Image (cartoon, grey):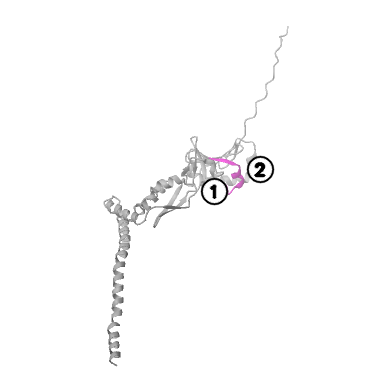
Amino acid sequence: MARSATLSAGRARREPDRPSRLRLWLKRRRGLARPAALGLLGLGALGAVAVGLYAADPAGRVQSVVENAAEIGLAAGLQYRDLVLEGHRNTPPDLIRAALGVERGDPLLSFSPVEARARLETIAWVESAHVERRFPGTILVRLTERTPFAIWQNGGRFAVIDREGRVVTTETLDAFGPLPLVVGAGAERQAAALHDLLVAHAEVLRRTQAMVRVGERRWNLRLHNGVDVLLPEGQEAPALNRLNELHARHALLDRPLVAIDMRLPDRLVLRQPPAPEPAQPVRRAGNPRG
């Protein structure tokens, strides 16, 4: 009995110690984990603060803080390694890389998506750009490019333009398939509206070689057969309706003419090529009589 009581007393003394040892073990584990967690939180907080300061201080008064944050990020593996391009078709890749202004291995925290986007949108092909960092080492670039609309000829020079008249390239003009040809000063800005009217008149459009801007105020259509159609200023739509009707009735656009003048509202003037000069009689040389 005495021995049984002694064993029971011993267990009673030892059993309350188990929770205490468990708490001591957890306390030690938390003590080891706390520095690592604080380090990760500190790195993220420092990166966020650095990025905020960088955005709020374009003059560079906290440049040293940004550089220190970039060095910490570089040590943590936050460095540029991959580029993901979306929406890219005609923009030269070397211009995209130059606009980003970053090399592989550079710290990602020192890269500014806002500044890179502004540089990208100065490229002729780029209408708008979206740039973002994807940690630990990727830059995403999403482009919206301008659409080639026509070839603009002015002063002996040729360029591909979009519908708003912006020049997107002056090279490899045949790489974009058949495009309308617009000619003259100011033609690049006004051509889209006239072309939209021509689309509604397929027979006229099919025979049109070029849309020629005259005096930056009105249009001529140069047809493939060499005929010039002189359209009235500001009245292109009714003139094209009339021209399309005359062609349907009389095959007007296929006649051997020099010009079709539609500038007067109450009459149509057809200019024909000059008549060939009559052949001169051939005189044969011979001895004079007598």
> Foreground mark, 1 or 2?
1
- The image quadrant of residue 281 is top right
Distance from label 1 to label 2 (Cα)?
Answer: 24 Å
Amino acid bearing label 1? Asp
Q: For residue 137: magenta?
A: no
Q: Which residue is mark 1?
A: 196
Which of the two discs, 1 and 2, labels the residue nearer the N terminus? 1
The stretch in magenta equals 195-211
Amino acid bearing label 2? His
Q: Are marks 1 and 2 in contact (CB under 8 Å)?
A: no
Q: Taking the image as drawn, is residue 262 in sight?
A: no
Which residue is depicted at the point 32% across and 53% down?
71
- The image quadrant of residue 261 is top right
Q: Which residue is mark 2?
A: 250
Q: Which mark is residue 282?
A: none
Say few, some or many: other residues with alpha carbon within 10 Å of mark 1 (under 14 / 14 to 19 / 20 or more): few
Q: With 82 as the anchor, is 180 left or right in this view?
A: right
